[in-house]
Image (cartoon, grey):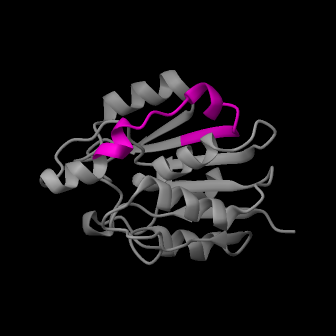
């Protein structure tokens, strides 16, 4: 049975945008890759996204790897928080994860983000749900303030943190169509 890798795209994204098609193609050489289109991507809701991930994973396996981008990171963390105490995954890789945001376009965007920002997570539980956490940030992300988010996650999850230079929010609009570091991390 091949190790499963789940790729969860970000807000307004799809499995066919940004670096996800490249990651999916590369990872399929060695792993079973599940890269779904998440529901209502332009107006993501916690329950719908977490339910979709629960449905896809089914019974979590000890060797599962979960990779998320932006709100996909939030989805993964919220999914993991719902697992029973005896369940755990191998690795969680979060690209542009956030608990603080800046520069959203308008009030509508802030209203969409608000539940994700304000619905708490129990990080003491999350620490037990994966063998390791790896977070990838960019030093020039317009929406994810680096130091605030890095310090928060370091304090709460004690992950390995990788900071890449000039990758923005890791979107194809910013020229990011692959993140080669992911291949070695899986």
Residue 88 as seen in the image, left or right of residue 52 = right
Residue at left 54%, top 45%?
78
Q: Is residue 164 visible?
A: no
Closer-to-camera residue (156/173)? 156
Taking the magenta stretch, the answer to whether it contains residue 18 is: no
Point out residue 69 in the picture as x, y percentages from the top left corner. 44, 56
Q: Residue at x 50, y 52 (%)?
A: 75
Image point (25%, 47%), residue name: 143
Quadrant housing the C terminus: bottom right
Quadrant in the picture for residue 125: top right
Q: Is residue 95 above or below residue 22?
A: above
Q: Is residue 121 magenta?
A: yes
The image quarter containing residue 134 is top right
Residue ranking furthest to the left = 106
Q: Which of 96/62 is in front? A: 62
Residue placed at 34% from the left, 39% from the top?
Answer: 117
**Vertical placement of 125 versus 103: above or below?**
above
Left or right: 62 with respect to 106?
right
Q: In the image, residue 47 lies at what x, y percent?
A: 49, 55
Pick the front one: 63 or 79: 79
Rendered location of residue 29, percent (x, y): 70, 75
Specify the segment rendered in magenta.
Answer: 114-134
Looking at the picture, how far across and down is residue 185, in whole percent?
63, 50
Res 139 visible: yes
């Amino acid at each position: 049975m091949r190790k499963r890798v789940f790729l969860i795209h970000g807000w307004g994204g799809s499995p066919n945008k940004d670096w996800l098609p490249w990651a999916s193609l590369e990872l399929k050489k060695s792993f079973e890759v599940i890269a779904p289109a998440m529901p209502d991507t332009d107006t993501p809701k916690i329950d719908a996204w977490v339910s979709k991930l629960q449905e896809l994973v089914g019974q979590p396996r000890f060797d599962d790897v979960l990779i998320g981008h932006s709100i996909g990171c939030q989805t993964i963390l919220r999914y993991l928080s719902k697992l029973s105490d005896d369940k755990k995954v191998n690795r969680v890789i979060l690209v542009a994860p956030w608990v603080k945001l800046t520069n959203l376009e308008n009030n509508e965007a802030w209203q969409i983000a608000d539940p994700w920002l304000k619905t708490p997570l129990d990080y003491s539980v999350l620490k037990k749900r994966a063998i390791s956490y790896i977070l990838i940030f960019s030093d020039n992300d317009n929406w994810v303030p680096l130091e605030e988010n890095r310090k928060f996650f370091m304090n709460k999850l004690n992950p390995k943190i990788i900071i890449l230079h000039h990758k923005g929010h890791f979107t194809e609009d910013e020229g990011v169509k692959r993140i080669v570091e992911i291949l070695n991390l899986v």
